[in-house]
Amino acid sequence: MRPSPVHFVPPQSLKPHPSALLLPMSPEDEHALEEDIRQHGLLHPLDVTPTNHILDGVHRWQEALHLGLTHVPVQVFTYQEQAEETLHALRANLKRRQLTSSQKAMLALEVEKILAEEAKKRQGARNDIAQKFGESQKGEAADKAAKLVGTNGQYILDAKKIVTIAPDLKDAVLKGTVTIPQAKVLATRSPHERSAILTNIMQGTKRALDLLKEHFPSHSSDYRYSSESSEWYTPQVYLAAVHELMGAIDLDPASNALANRVVNATQYYDKATNGLTKPWTGRVFVNPPYGQESGASNQGVWSERLIAQYTRGITTEAVLLVNAVTERNWFQPLWDYPICFTNHRIAFYNEKLAPPAPTHGNAFVYFGKQEQRFVSIFSRFGTVVKRVSFLERDVMPTPLSNNQA
């Protein structure tokens, strides 16, 4: 495609092409570009469409507006299809920018959307034709996007998961603030926690980056299994769901002052007060300490205690958070209650805010009369199940929901 001869137009007559806005520029690069244009003028023409949409040179155009230039050089590229304009904009920008694999993967998602939409348009406006646009065409768009931006398929899959779970992280990855592996860790945090950590990262706080280390300790160094270091705290996003379900948390029997800042229980017991010796009254949340005491699993001891308190009517409603170790003997009684098995490993934190090393999936177990509400709220974290014994029933029971197995 040959461009038109270079000519000059007022910058106010131009506007960015949507595809040219996908690639970020760092503040440092923006400053350097502004200084260069201030000293030498706009030396390279902008690539534009016949409708004055900028395919390449958006940042130069923005600086021209900022500096008050009256005219800028442009060359016009004419394409038959909008997809060709998109490819022009992306190729021109990718050639000049030094993007990381994480940035390219997140960018590929946007490219895939554009290419898929163009493929739909090419099939025509008739409904019977448009409905034929299926997984094969979507797959072709994904493959083309990956090839265009030059990144690996696994990173693109990870980017899709991140955008689904925590869409607010998309811009952070695109701007290069965090990598895909770091965003995967951040996605387990609440929106408020994510915002705070990102702010600290942008301010250069090393401790914030330490929270998002891409390589976690091995299983042998995961001291959640050590009785000397058994306290790990639950991220806020899950506690928000507990509050949404029960209305409030009256008691956290396995907590301390730091953890309760997030749990927000009316009352809590710590190591000194020993919650195993106290009544668990009202609405209870329990994240048992890890490790073992006297050869017995702490999770088993605390789970057994909750079942006893609930059965006696002392605990009126409760959510228990444990490892999803369904083969353990202590886990078997929990099958009598609705269980949400998470579709990810929860990244707990501790008093040192050390990077987590999750080695198991997790399970939320519900004790109470709001089973349908538990299904509705906790299905966002995984699949809800409840044991059914067919030997005790003459008919197939009605499932709680489509998320129950």
Image (cartoon, rainbow, N blue to C red):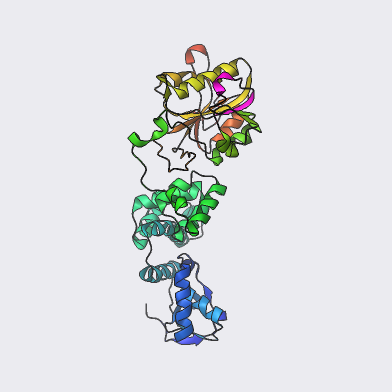
Does 192 sit above or below residue 79? above
Say whether residue 52 is visible: no
Name the foreground residue: 61 vs 66. 66
Which corner quadrant holds the N terminus? bottom left
Q: Position of residue 379 (x, y in %)?
A: 53, 35
Name the foreground residue: 287 vs 59. 287
Say whether residue 216 is visible: yes
Is 248 left or right of 182, judged from the image as shown? right
Residue, x 43% and y 72% (percent of image)? 80
Q: Position of residue 339 (x, y in %)?
A: 51, 27
Q: Position of residue 201 (x, y in %)?
A: 48, 56
Q: How many callouts does the rendering have?
A: 0
Name the foreground residue: 288 vs 395. 288
Does 324 sit above or below residue 67? above
Residue, x 54% and y 45% (percent of image)? 190
Q: Quadrant of residue 145?
A: bottom left
Q: Position of residue 342 (x, y in %)?
A: 47, 35
Query: Is residue 254 found inside the magenta-colored segment of the image?
Result: no
Does 207 sit above or below residue 46? above
Q: Which residues are magenta?
A: 273-287
